[in-house]
Image: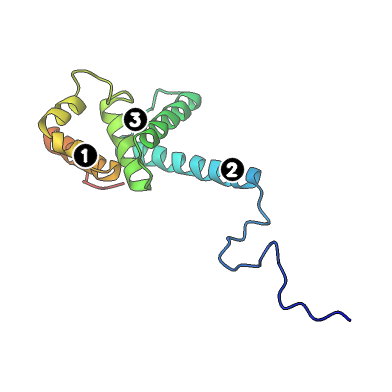
Amino acid sequence: MLHPLPFFFNEQPNTTWHPHFALLGEPQLNAFEHCYRWIFEERIHDWLKKTDPLALAKQTDDQIESWLKQALDGAMAWGLTSEYALATWADICHEWGLDFTDQPQGPYQSWRTLYPEHLQLSPELRIDALDEYRQKTHNTTDAQHDR
């Protein structure tokens, strides 16, 4: 005679804390990310055209797309993640150039020299400090934080 088992093993326990991504595969998630990035790049481009109608005016669509991609890739490589920080980076790139961090005599190097303590800040706080410096030193007429 068999007795009831006092316990059993469930190799895949049903847990409620797992995200429910069962309906989306990696290709779909990548497509959503790509779509979000494209929409964000368009928003940055629209904002640049609004704040400076001549910005990128003589560029082809491919050149504009390349510029936006380089600007956002540079921001992400710097560790920026929030939309606000990414937009701030794009704004600085618009004013100082895509390679502003590599220019040996540029305003970014001056900021690093004047405020070495800011280099220890998190990327999001560091870009805010850099933007504040840029606005003070260049008397930017744009509304601060109008991104």
Residue 123, percent from left and from top: 29, 41
Seen as rendered, the residue at the extreme front is 1
Residue 133 pos. (x, y %): 15, 37
- What kind of element bears circle 3? loop
**Mark 2 falls on what kind of element?**
helix
Q: Nearer the viewer, residue 10 or 139?
A: 10
Contact flag, marks 2 and 3 (Cβ < 8 Å)? no
* 3 or 1: mark nearer the eye: 1
Q: Which mark is residue 96?
A: none
Q: Is residue 130 visible?
A: no
Rendered position, 131 above or below 106: below
Left/right of residue 27 with respect to residue 133 in the rendered view: right
Q: Could you tell me residue 63's position as x and y percent?
A: 46, 24
Q: Is residue 135 above or below residue 83?
A: above
| Disc 1 target residue | 120
- Mark found first going from the N terminus, 3 or 1: 3
In this orientation, which residue lies closer to the viewer: 18 or 102?
18
- The answer to which quarter of the image holds residue 18 is bottom right
Disc 1 packing (10 Å; few <14; some 14–19; many ≥20)? few
Q: In the picture provided, is 119 more to the left or to the right than 147?
A: left
Q: Which residue is mark 2?
A: 30
Amino acid on which the number 2 mark rests in the picture: Asn
- Mark positioned earlier in the residue sequence (1 or 2): 2
According to the picture, the residue beneath numbered tag 3 turns out to be 55
Kind of residue indicated by mark 1 = Gln
How far apart marks 2 and 3 lie (CA) works out to 30 Å
How far apart, in angstroms, are the residues tagged by discs 3 and 1?
33 Å
Tell me the SS state at disc 1: helix
